[in-house]
Image: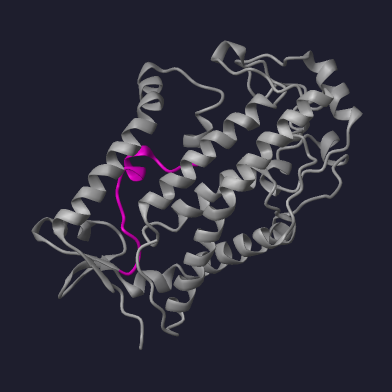
Amino acid sequence: MPLRAGTEVLSESEWQARESAHRQRVDAFCAPHLARRRAGRAHPVWDFLFTYYNLRPRLLRRWHPGFGVVLAGESVARHLDIAGYHHTPQGVTVSTEYLAGRADTVGFIADLLTATARRAPRMNCFGLHEWAMVYRAPEVRHAQVPLRLGPTGTDAVVESMPLRCSHFDAFRFFTDAAAGRNAERLTRDRQIATEQPGCVHAAMDCYKWAYKLGPLVSSELVMDCLELAADARELDMRASPYDLSGYGFDPIAVETPAGRAEYVRAQQEIAERAAPLRATLAGRCDLLRTAARGAGADVTGG
């Protein structure tokens, strides 16, 4: 049976309830960031979720049910103003033409997430990527917060342990002096071959891949990934060389054995939470890729 865009129909009351719940969830998450932005205040930890990950709050707030779901009712016409949606006899849904145009993106994300999940998690980097970004650097990346150990102490930590970063989008910010110390010189072309599920940034990036798939995946899944990314970001920065005590974050002193053990425990928790989200995204991508190829599949929601 060939796939049709729209194999599940949500009544107007059903989809409006989900839309309302999603908007409330987004509003609660984004409110502190928006308040800081209005006041012109930067935040060295949380701004990352809205700058490096560049989905604007107003777009995050826009609810999508995912490919294969038809929205019924009189008020659904406003979805026709959103890229990818079209009208069918049953209601409004994301079109197969839109999916076909996103096939390359879907395929890349599927391959990356599947390859990542198949590898054994490695828990021996101790979050030193942030340290490597300021190793022997003439300027501090986050000028509004000091280095906890100062430049000399920070450099000494990097020189005392091996760098084992597996995430290209962290490695590309290493100073030249630090890049040469990494166990492997990472490249974009080899990202699929080197990403591994123990990496805190790989967990954070589940959010990036989820929102890049919009509106083909559900907004609920996007928010699940964002909430994980926030917790991973907190761990990332607590283990960083920066003194964030003024922002309410206690440091994880990875320069000590106790600090490294604490980091690994937290890293394992993040990896365990990321695994089912990564699997859901990868499975969704596989179904979408099958649908885009016209091979036929039951693709609804997600």
Residue 233, given in percent of the width and then of the height, sits at 58, 33
Query: Is residue 250 shown left or right of residue 248?
Result: right
> What residue sits 56% from the left and 23% below the top?
44
Task: Please check the rendered image and state whether residue 175 is part of the magenta-colored stretch, yes or no.
Answer: no
> What residue sits 70% from the left and 54% below the top?
195
| Numbered range of the magenta stretch | 53-68
Q: Quadrant for the N terminus, please.
A: bottom left
Query: Is residue 13 shown left or right of residue 157?
Result: left
Task: Please check the rendered image and state whether residue 55 is part of the magenta-colored stretch, yes or no.
Answer: yes
> What residue sits 77% from the left and 33% below the top?
128
Residue 244, given in percent of the width and then of the height, sits at 62, 16
Q: Decide if residue 52 is in sight here.
A: no
Outermost residue on the left side: it is 74
The kind of secondary structure the magenta stretch mainly shows is loop
Query: Is residue 99 shown left or right of residue 265?
Result: left
Residue 193, given in percent of the width and then of the height, sits at 74, 61
Residue 264, given in percent of the width and then of the height, sits at 73, 36
Name above or below for residue 276 compared with residue 69: above
